[in-house]
Amino acid sequence: MRILSFCLLLLFPTFIMAQEGRKVTCRVVALDPATPPPALLASSGDGAEIKVAVPTGTLSEEMSLYSKTDVFTFLNATDRKPAATATLPAGIKAAILLFVAGPKTQAAQSWRVFVIEDSAKNFPDGGAFVANFHNKNIRFVIGEHKIMLKPAGSTGVARPTDRDEFNMAAVTFQFQQDETWRDASESTLRFLPGTRYLMIAFVDPASGRPRIVTFQDINTKAPAAS
């Protein structure tokens, strides 16, 4: 009986954690401004719900989302039907949730949610986070940084030192198509302390053309350490 009681005491904190679930600080954004998600609902804990408006072109304000598991569910605010889910690994305390339109059925538009850990490793101060949604390799240059990413690859990029007097640095992207490389984007961006960029490389399903979507974010506080 003593051994059983001791085991129950050891397991009790685990039971409490399972019942309590977890909260994650999140920011949300839609990839394509032409197909923004509808108004959504999500759990904020203690049986409460919050309205989630997914912006385009800029990241939302921080919100605290709750789930009993690692899967966070978003409901359509109109009919309360499930609209999207996001799986957040247990170690993530802060995340950016990127909503991407999936195949549209007769019933409704489907949504996929890509989870990006909001950490100093992914978002170096004054730098960028780049993700490859293309089904082949991409390569890009940010200042002095020259990087290749495989499909579904991603990386944080430090603030480039190769900048002009206005803190501008060259940014170019190329997509692999068959055995050749196709230019996708060539520009200059300003890299300043306290700012960061989220860059997504993908092929537009409508036009078949390579695209780079860039979100600029101005931090009021440092991201969570990884």
Image (cartoon, grey):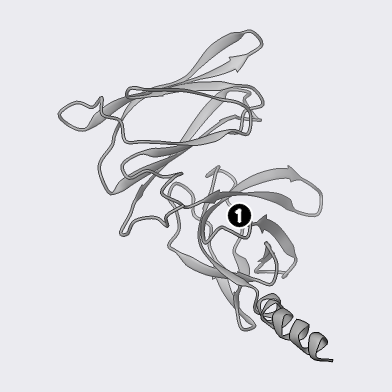
Residue beneath the point at 66% across and 56% down: 86
Residue pointed to by mark 1: 37
Q: Is residue 30 above or below residue 172?
A: below
Can I make out residue 131 in this image? Answer: no
Mark 1 residue crowding within 10 angstroms, few (<14) / some (14–19) / many (20+): many
Question: Which residue corresponds to the image point at 62% horizontal and 25% vertical from the top-left?
Answer: 207
Task: Please indicate whether residue 199 sits to the left or right of residue 71 in the image.
Answer: left
Which residue occupies the extreme bottom position in the image?
Answer: 1
Residue 156 vs 194, above or below: the answer is: above
The residue depicted at 55 percent of the width and 42 percent of the height is 32
Q: Is residue 76 left or right of residue 56?
A: right
Q: Quadrant of residue 223?
A: bottom left
Q: Residue furthest top?
A: 179
Q: Is residue 120 above or below residue 15?
A: above
Image position, residue 187 (x, y; %): 35, 24
Q: Position of residue 172 (x, y in %)?
A: 41, 21
| Amino acid of disc 1 | Pro
* Residue 140 place in picture, x, y as percent: 45, 22
- Direction left: furthest residue: 165
| Residue 173 appears in the picture as rendered | yes
Tell whether 110 sits left or right of 129.
Answer: right
Residue appearing at x 56%, y 74% in the figure: 50
Assign the N terminus to one quadrant of the image.
bottom right
Number of marks present in the image shown: 1
Dot 1 falls on a residue whose secondary structure is loop
Query: Which residue extends farthest right?
Result: 1
Residue 128: give x, y in percent of width and height.
40, 38
